[in-house]
Amino acid sequence: MALLTTPFDRESTTDDVLKGVSLAGKRAVVTGATSGLGTETARALASAGAEVVLAARRPEAAGETAAEITRTTGNPMVSARALDLADLRSVRAFTDAWTGPLHMLVNNAAIMALPEPDRTPEGRELQFGTNYLGHFALTLGLHPALAAAGGARIVSVSSSGHLMSPVIFDDLDYRFRPYDPWSAYGQSKTADILLAVEADRRWSGEGIRANALNPGAIATNLQRHTGGLRTPDHLRKTVPQGAATTVLLAASPLLEGIGGRYFEDCAQSPVLLERPQALGVSGVAPYALDLKNAARLWRTGEELIGV
């Protein structure tokens, strides 16, 4: 099967991708929308007319961001709601309170390379618990709203970091193997891709399509534990360039009916046979698209959140 391409590339911005697209009457949730890629994704969707909910751990900061997006776009339908992905009680409160259809769910929030091991209130390794399990519970809880939309999209923001580790099912929480910040991050980002793969397989018949992506190297708050972005300048993107692939998957007519895939630079990525040794090589690990892995992780996720 040929890889899907679009007229856009790594230089394209969110405004390029949404030029001429109207999202009037559509509703979106963007997690982690108080800074960086999340804020730009929310701004871009709002600028095209969508009703956008900024779901964030700090609702006060999210409220300020929502007000600024309304000021710059003229769209009054931008709001903030509390959501702590590391706490399943918070996730349940968010999904229980949701009413009406949902057309776009952008699972964007993440933490990266925590120097010391930490755990969620439920005892999960914090990067896995936040980046994957919280988003899994959110996606599952919002399934009725997505199905009611009559055509919805789920977007999982992953990373080239997924190449650092598959999901280690026998020790998800580093209770036996020594904790490593980067393999823990890699595992969680692989899990984010598998979430999209299995959601698309299960729900495409209901009009729900899901894809995952690598936004590229962008200087944001995500690097707070790593001393800042260290990628060479020529491989970096601006925030509007980094969020372009997210917005493409969430809202572009070019992705109508497309699901279960992984994208970079506004195009579908090739499957790699081994981890690249050079920076800037695009591609996805086969274990991140494996249907058996995806189904197993979904069942594991259900067990961990008590479904």
Image (spheres, rainbow, N blue to C red):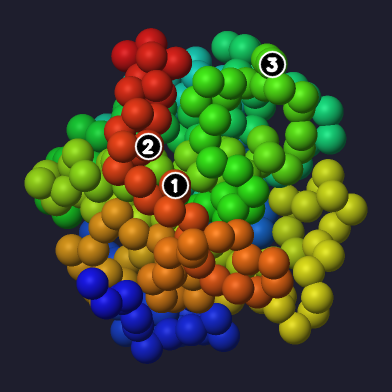
Q: CA distance from mark 1 to mark 2?
A: 7 Å
Three-letter amino acid code of the residue under disc 3: Phe
In the picture, residue 174 is in which quadrant?
top right
Image mark for residue 287: 1
* Residue 83 position within the rendered picture, expressed as x and y whole percent measured from the top left: 53, 31
150 sits to left or right of 276: left
In the picture, residue 39 is in which quadrant?
bottom right
In the rendered structure, are the residues bearing label 1 and label 2 in contact, judged by CB atoms less than 8 Å apart?
Answer: yes
Q: Nearer the viewer, residue 235 or 140?
A: 235
From the image, tell me which residue sits under label 2. Answer: 293
- Vertically, is 44 above or below 284? below
Residue lying at 67% horizontally and 36% vertically, measured from the top left: 184
Disc 1 secondary structure class: helix
Q: Nearer the viewer, residue 53 or 236?
A: 236
* Residue 261 position within the rendered picture, expressed as x and y whole percent measured from the top left: 34, 59
Disc 3 secondary structure class: loop
Disc 2 secondary structure class: helix
* Residue 61 position within the rendered picture, expressed as x and y whole percent measured from the top left: 67, 43
Q: CA distance from mark 2 to mark 3?
A: 21 Å
Which mark is first along the chain, 3 or 1?
Answer: 3
Which mark is first along the chain, 2 or 1?
Answer: 1
Which mark is first along the chain, 3 or 2?
Answer: 3
Q: CA distance from mark 1 to mark 3?
A: 22 Å
184 sits to left or right of 93: right
Three-letter amino acid code of the residue under disc 2: Asn
Residue lying at 80% horizontally and 75% vertically, measured from the top left: 232
From the image, tell me which residue sits under label 3. Answer: 176
